[in-house]
Image: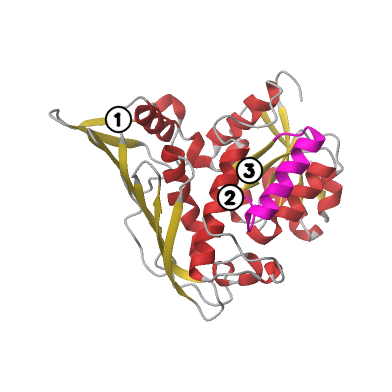
Amino acid sequence: MTADSVRWGILATGGIAAAFTADLLDLPEARVVAVASRSEASARAFAERFGIPRAYGEWAALAEDTDIDVVYVATPHAAHRAAAGLCLAAGRNVLCEKPFTLNVREAGELVALAREHGRFLMEAMWMYCNPVIRRVAELVRDGAIGEVRTVQADFGLAGPFPPTHRLRDPQQGGGALLDLGVYPVSFAQLLLGEPADVTARAVLSEEGVDLQTGAVLSWESGALASVHCSLVSDTPRTASVTGTQGRIDLPHGFFHPDRFVLHRDGRAPQEFTADPADGPGTTFRHEAREVMRALRAGETESPLVPLDGTLAVMRTLDAIRDRIGVRYPSETGEPELTPA
């Protein structure tokens, strides 16, 4: 790492890795220097597509590359623990895609590993780095809508997804909750912290993953959050937070918004829009910039996506899965979850 650039390695070559890499290449301070896949052919094709100098046909080679400042882990969910853990143990800093891991046990292992080795670790919760979401959280913290009473958020896709798709594959951590529901849950916890209690219902697939899940999260303050995710219906994908003195509404695509509307008692609605200088809300550049800022500052975690917050979200996701009866093959033999 120099004053001018941060060197990135990309672990995995799927669609999310390609989208993230394309955004990195638009950042003058970022250099993508290596990519790894379990398939050497896939790694080479990815490297040729993006002009990356080094391509590895195994994860370990990337993890051991000392000319990499940070690794972006973009494997399917079920491999996050192994991939990120390999990189951390080898001394690499890591940005790991969401959901961080399959469960809080795995997440805790990664956090412990990062802290043991003094490495930077962050969940790629790009929503938390979005400037518009940050403004919403700031207004709520400053009491712009009074005391928060309710949060509502949903994320659903119509599909249909065949049983062979990764979203329905238990071996890959499939299901609506981990892939989509992590956004509504993370949004609620950004504003209210970890809930005191969780209730949930779901419709499960023949493979045993959730096709549709609804949950109510509650806090000792009396606040409630209603969150929903689906692989069988194209939901509005909106969010709102209501307080004792007003409400904030976020439009379709609430997790990467470019605007929101603030409603306050006795005042006309006020629309806030993204600063054009920040770039589009759909970009991954915000989280990449935050990672590079933190690395240059010598920080081992980001204040925007703190590790304790990631662990808290994973505990809630675990609690929801406990209520709806979703358990992954790799979890067989683990003790039952303690109800939240």
- Read off the magenta span: 100-120
Residue linked to disc 3: 21
Q: Is residue 181 above or below residue 10?
A: below
Residues packed near mark 3 inside 10 Å, few (<14), some (14 to 19) or many (20 plus): many
Label located before the other in sequence (3 or 1): 3
In reply to whether residue 107 is colored magenta, the answer given is yes
Q: Which residue is mark 2?
A: 98
In the rendered image, which residue does mark 1 sit on? Answer: 272
SS for callout 3: helix
In the rendered image, the residue lying farthest to the left is: 266
Residue at left offset 58%, top offset 50%: 98
Near-viewer residue (53 or 102): 102
Residue mark closest to the camera, 3 vs 1: 1
Measured from the top left, where is residue 34 in percent x and y?
Answer: 77, 42
Q: Position of residue 167 (x, y in %)?
A: 55, 67
- What colour scheme was applied to this rendering of the protein? secondary structure
How many angstroms separate mark 2 from mark 1 (CA)?
A: 27 Å
Depth check, mark 3 against mark 2: the one in front is 2
Inspect the image, locate mark 1, and give the three-letter code of the amino acid beneath it.
Phe
Dividing the image into 4 quarters, which one contains the N terminus? Answer: top right
Per the rendering, the mark at residue 223 is: none
* Residue 120 x/y as whole percent: 71, 34
Kind of residue indicated by mark 3? Thr
Q: Amino acid at mark 2?
A: Lys
Q: Main secondary structure of the magenta part?
A: helix
Residue 209 drawn in magenta: no
The Cα–Cα distance between marks 3 and 2, rounded to whole angstroms, is 16 Å
Q: Secondary structure at mark 2?
A: loop
- Pick the residue in front: 146 or 126: 146
Give the crowd class for mark 2: few <14, some 14-19, many >=20 residues within 10 Å. Answer: many
Please rate how many residues cluster around mark 1, counting C-alpha atoms within 10 Å: few if below 14, some from 14 to 19, many from 20.
some
